[in-house]
């Protein structure tokens, strides 16, 4: 009897132990991911003075709620994080904020575990970036950045995180096109190496050491995820190729601001969470122990909108003082706007808002000619009345400085032809107006116009033959003549694929953000009248309709 009781006891004990062991053998790791936050820290658009759909303050509320559900959480970011809003601009330039990076302040409160550098992290140069990295309570990753030590930039290629019995490896890859988008003064002595080679090397090193391997890349997909159609020669976007690397469980992407729901591409799960902290990618990884390691058994994922969530009070409180300073600066009177000004989208005629940017570029540099594009994406109208820095931020949301280069007449023509490459013709339905057709894949900021010359654009002509009657000072452009041309630093570094500008002789560099130059111009002028110079027009060639038979 005693032996039977012992046997029953040990059987029950083994059963209970088995239940506990079985529970311990199956774990769920939750991965939360943001990218292209662009310093949207609080749910308020200070430029347009309206609520915003996303912010790091709302991300903080989501992360806190998820951590209550599951303590095994990893929070990551994909870059283009510290730049993009007035609060970031004034802090990064040192005008406000007493040296503290507000985006990092918010990220520290969210509790990020790691972030990958994006290209916009370099827009203000290495000084502000070093400060942001040093203030972070989490590591910044960039496996394909060389000479980081010489630059005093504390970034790592990878990090291993421990969550309970789980080990999680995270490799970061930044975009290697940074030298084509930012002037050398912003990134030297760094070097940017082949992202595929570096990712392959570090994935192979880490895979045997970890249970879960995550690759965070500041890059989009060079192929369509449904059809597989695309161009693998694309140096800017290479996420499709990264997804083919063996050993990667999750590939978390950014840069292209797309809402890509979690899905499987080959053997790798991929996703992208849009922009501006409006979405958070959530993966729930269900793992089962096999020997000393855990195996990924099942994956669930979705992109979660944060708009319904409240802003986390700790983030709001931490940024309240700086937010008030920025609001006061945006409303500071600089002069008078003598007429209403509409901006946003791609104009179909010479546009007062773009011409105002031209005027400031010429005023700040003394160049003969100016190249600029419409940069304000969403429509917005400023009424006649007080002129404030808010208009400067609306006109120019990007952190570009100005570069004056020397170009020939022939190069200038080819630059303008490149600017007109996205037009696809006209669609006319008489008696209504004709519609201008364009390549929707090209953002409006790729359609530059020229000030200081006059010309016609024929959107119906073949590419490379669309610019007609190009004249300077009323005279036809001589191919061998030379001119000084002011462009923004993005164009001067090769941004947008514009020909000749990257290799052109530099005459001058104005190391000041364009938004600050606009503010300086407003102050200097006092009164600003928005008007277009009407130096260019759309003018398709016409043919006479055949005479109707009588």
Image: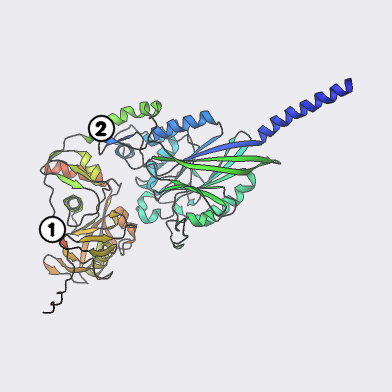
Can residue 45 be seen at all in this image of the molecule?
no
- Residue 284, quarter of the rendered image: top right
Q: Quadrant of the N terminus?
A: top right
- Residue 226 placement (x, y as % from top left): 47, 56
What residue is disc 2 on?
327
Depicted 349 relative to depicted 107: above or below: below
Q: CA distance from mark 1 to mark 2?
A: 35 Å
Q: 95 or 300, which lies in front?
A: 300
Label 1 element class: loop
Label 2 element class: helix
Residue that protrudes farthest toward the bottom in the picture: 550
Depicted 8 relative to depicted 511: above or below: above
What residue is disc 1 on?
534
Residue at (16% x, 45% y) in the render: 341
Q: Residues within 10 Å of mark 1 (few under 14, many from 20)?
A: some
- Residue 152 placement (x, y as % from top left): 45, 44
Give whichever of discs 1 and 2 has the lower sequence position. Answer: 2
Q: Quadrant of the C terminus?
A: bottom left
Query: In the picture provided, is 483 more to the left or to the right than 1?
Result: left
Can residue 385 be seen at all in this image of the molecule?
yes
> Which label sits on residue 349?
none
- Residue 343 placement (x, y as % from top left): 21, 47
């Amino acid at each position: 009897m005693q032996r039977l009781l012992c046997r029953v006891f040990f059987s029950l004990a083994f059963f209970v132990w088995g239940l506990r062991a079985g529970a311990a053998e199956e774990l769920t790791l939750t991965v939360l991911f943001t990218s292209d936050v662009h310093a949207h820290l609080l749910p308020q658009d200070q430029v347009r003075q309206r609520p915003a759909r996303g912010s790091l303050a709302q991300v903080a509320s989501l992360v806190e709620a998820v951590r209550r559900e599951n303590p095994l959480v990893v929070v990551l970011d994909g870059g283009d994080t510290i730049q993009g809003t007035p609060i970031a601009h004034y802090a990064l330039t040192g005008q406000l904020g007493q040296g503290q990076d507000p985006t990092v302040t918010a990220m520290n409160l969210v509790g990020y575990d790691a972030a990958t550098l994006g290209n916009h992290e370099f827009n203000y140069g290495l000084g502000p970036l070093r400060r942001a990295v040093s203030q972070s309570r989490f590591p910044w990753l960039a496996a394909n950045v060389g000479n980081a030590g010489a630059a005093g930039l504390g970034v790592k290629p990878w990090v291993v995180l421990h969550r309970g019995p789980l080990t999680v490896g995270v490799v970061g890859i930044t975009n290697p096109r940074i030298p084509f988008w930012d002037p050398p003064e912003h990134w030297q002595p760094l070097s940017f190496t082949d992202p595929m080679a570096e990712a392959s090397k570090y994935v192979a090193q880490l895979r045997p050491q970890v249970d879960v391997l995550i690759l965070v890349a500041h890059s989009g997909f060079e192929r369509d995820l449904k059809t597989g159609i695309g161009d693998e020669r694309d140096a800017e976007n290479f996420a499709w190729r990264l997804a083919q690397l063996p050993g990667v469980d999750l590939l978390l992407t950014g840069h292209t601001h797309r809402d890509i729901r979690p899905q499987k591409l080959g053997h790798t799960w991929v996703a992208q969470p849009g922009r501006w902290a409006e979405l958070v990618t959530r993966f729930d990884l269900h793992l089962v122990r096999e020997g000393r390691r855990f195996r990924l058994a099942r994956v669930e994922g979705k992109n979660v909108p944060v708009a319904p969530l409240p802003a986390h009070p700790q983030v709001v409180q931490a940024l309240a003082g700086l937010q008030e300073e920025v609001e006061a600066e945006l409303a500071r009177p600089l002069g008078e706007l003598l007429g209403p000004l509409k901006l946003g989208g791609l104009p179909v005629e010479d546009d007062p808002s773009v011409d105002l940017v031209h005027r400031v570029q010429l005023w700040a540099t003394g160049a003969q000619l100016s190249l600029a594009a419409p940069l304000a994406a969403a429509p917005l109208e400023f009424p006649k009345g007080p002129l404030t820095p808010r208009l400067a931020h609306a006109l120019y949301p990007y952190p570009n400085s100005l570069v004056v280069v020397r170009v020939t007449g022939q190069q200038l023509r080819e630059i303008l032809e490149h600017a007109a490459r996205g037009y696809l013709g006209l669609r006319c339905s008489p008696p209504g107006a004709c519609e201008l057709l364009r390549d929707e894949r090209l953002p409006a900021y790729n359609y530059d116009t020229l000030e200081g010359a006059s010309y016609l654009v024929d959107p119906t002509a073949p590419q490379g033959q669309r610019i007609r009657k190009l004249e300077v000072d009323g005279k036809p452009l001589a191919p061998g003549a030379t001119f000084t041309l002011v462009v923004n630093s993005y164009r001067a570094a090769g941004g947008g694929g514009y020909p000749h500008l990257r290799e052109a002789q530099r005459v001058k560099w104005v190391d000041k953000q364009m938004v600050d130059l606009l503010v300086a111009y407003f102050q200097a002028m006092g009164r600003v009248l928005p008007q277009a110079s009407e130096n260019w027009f759309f003018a398709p060639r016409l043919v006479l309709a055949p005479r109707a038979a009588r």
